[in-house]
């Protein structure tokens, strides 16, 4: 199952994608589950975080089973083609900062010329950095070294603290993709990473969240980045120094993780700063970030206004 958020006339809408058709989840509920009666207030979540929070996957499976039982013409009447909707980030405004781990791939450590970490290195990106899968990355005047980082993102599905490593993947709702856009000069000069990672539009996210049941082996996915069609990054999540379960267990030690929390799991080698000379992004570039089995972000780089 692929869960997405798209732009509706009255604001963001929660959808589920089946065979390139987008079904509006609240509308499905009203049409198929309670067609004769009034839907109780709050009976079905209208955003993805609330949906995850209420463990509504069973309901959507029921809805989709009802959809598949309909004649083809009736099914099409309940859906919109994917090409006809404007995708937003699946979680347009996370409730918390995005948790991110650095230095989690050996090739990226080598190109950065830093020692391998003994423990996961954590930083965060604020909700204001999040943009949709095809929205422009704004190149601000505050940097002259704009870089890209392709990353697999874990979406937490259950509340937990001190989560055992062997149970960690049971706390995952699904997976999505992020470009951890970075101002390298700000990152270097500040002595820590938050500012250089957190400017507006520095977290393209999406194009949807794939439920974990559709990706039973998340530690065997290919991660890629392309700039203007040129392949820059390509590696397997199997290369991670700290695998997903280890990251979830480490982050949750003494700290509660909640439904809808996002964990970006690090980037492979091939970022712009790793080339000699560096190959940073320029206005007019198009960056594509992809994770196998999930999808592609395709964001143009534009000059920031002002």
Image: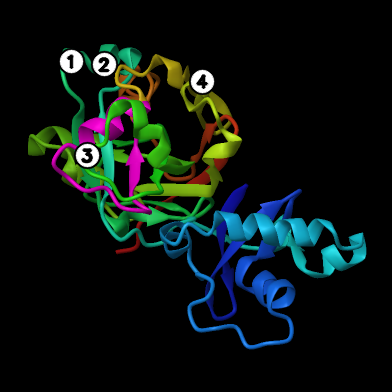
Residue drawn 68% across the image and 79% down it: 34
Residue matched to label 2: 109
Question: Counting other residues with Cα less than 10 Å from the Cα at mark 1, is it few (<14), some (14-19), or many (20 or more)?
Answer: few
The span from disc 1 to disc 4 (Cα, nearest Å) is: 26 Å
| Label 4 residue SS | helix
Instruction: Decide if residue 22 is on the left or right side of residue 271.
Output: right
Give whichever of discs 2 and 4 has the lower sequence position. Answer: 2
Give whichever of discs 1 and 4 has the lower sequence position. Answer: 1
Instruction: Decide if residue 174 is on the left or right side of residue 267.
Output: right
- Are the residues tagged 3 and 1 within 8 Å (C-beta)? no
Question: In the figure, residue 121 lies in which quadrant?
Answer: top left
Give whichever of discs 4 and 3 has the lower sequence position. Answer: 4
Nearest the camera: 60 or 142?
A: 60
- Are the residues tagged 4 and 3 within 8 Å (C-beta)? no
Magenta highlight range: 244-265
The span from disc 4 to disc 3 (Cα, nearest Å) is: 23 Å
Q: Position of residue 171 (x, y in %)?
A: 38, 41
Residue matched to label 1: 114
The label shown at residue 290 is none
Q: Position of residue 126 (x, y in %)?
A: 26, 54
| Label 1 residue SS | loop
The span from disc 3 to disc 1 (Cα, nearest Å) is: 26 Å
The span from disc 2 to disc 4 (Cα, nearest Å) is: 20 Å
Residue drawn 48% across the image and 44% down it: 284
Viewer can see residue 282: no
Instruction: Decide if residue 42 is on the left or right side of residue 192.
Output: right
Residue matched to label 3: 252
Establish if 43 lies above or below 36.
above
| Label 3 residue SS | loop
Residue 247 falls inside the magenta stretch? yes
């Amino acid at each position: 199952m692929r869960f997405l958020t798209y732009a509706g006339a009255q604001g963001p809408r929660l959808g589920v994608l089946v065979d390139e058709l987008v079904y509006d989840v609240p509308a499905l509920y009203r049409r198929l589950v309670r067609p004769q009666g009034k839907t109780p207030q709050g009976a079905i979540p209208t955003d993805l975080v609330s949906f995850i929070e209420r463990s509504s996957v069973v309901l959507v499976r029921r809805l989709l089973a009802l959809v598949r039982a309909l004649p083809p013409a009736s099914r099409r009447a309940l859906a919109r083609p994917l090409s006809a909707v404007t995708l937003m980030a699946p979680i347009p405004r996370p409730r918390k900062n995005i948790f991110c781990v650095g230095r989690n791939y050996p090739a990226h450590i080598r190109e950065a010329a830093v020692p391998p970490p003994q423990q996961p290195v954590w930083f965060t990106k604020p909700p204001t950095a999040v943009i949709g899968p095809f929205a422009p990355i704004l190149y601000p005047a505050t940097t002259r070294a704009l870089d890209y980082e392709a990353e697999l993102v874990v979406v937490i599905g259950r509340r937990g603290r001190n989560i055992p490593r062997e149970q960690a993947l049971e706390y995952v709702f699904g997976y999505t993709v992020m470009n951890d856009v970075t101002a390298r000069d700000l990152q270097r000069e500040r002595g820590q990473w938050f500012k250089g990672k957190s400017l507006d539009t520095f977290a393209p996210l999406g194009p949807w969240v794939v439920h974990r049941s559709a990706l039973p082996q998340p530690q065997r996915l290919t991660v890629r980045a392309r700039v203007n069609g040129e392949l820059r990054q390509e590696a397997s999540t199997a290369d991670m120094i700290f695998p997903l379960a280890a990251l979830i267990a480490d982050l949750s030690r003494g700290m509660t993780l909640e439904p809808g929390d996002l964990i970006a799991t690090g980037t492979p080698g091939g970022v712009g700063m790793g080339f000699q000379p560096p190959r940073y992004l320029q206005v007019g570039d198009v960056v594509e970030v992809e994770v196998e089995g999930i999808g592609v972000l395709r964001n143009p780089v534009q000059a920031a206004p002002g």
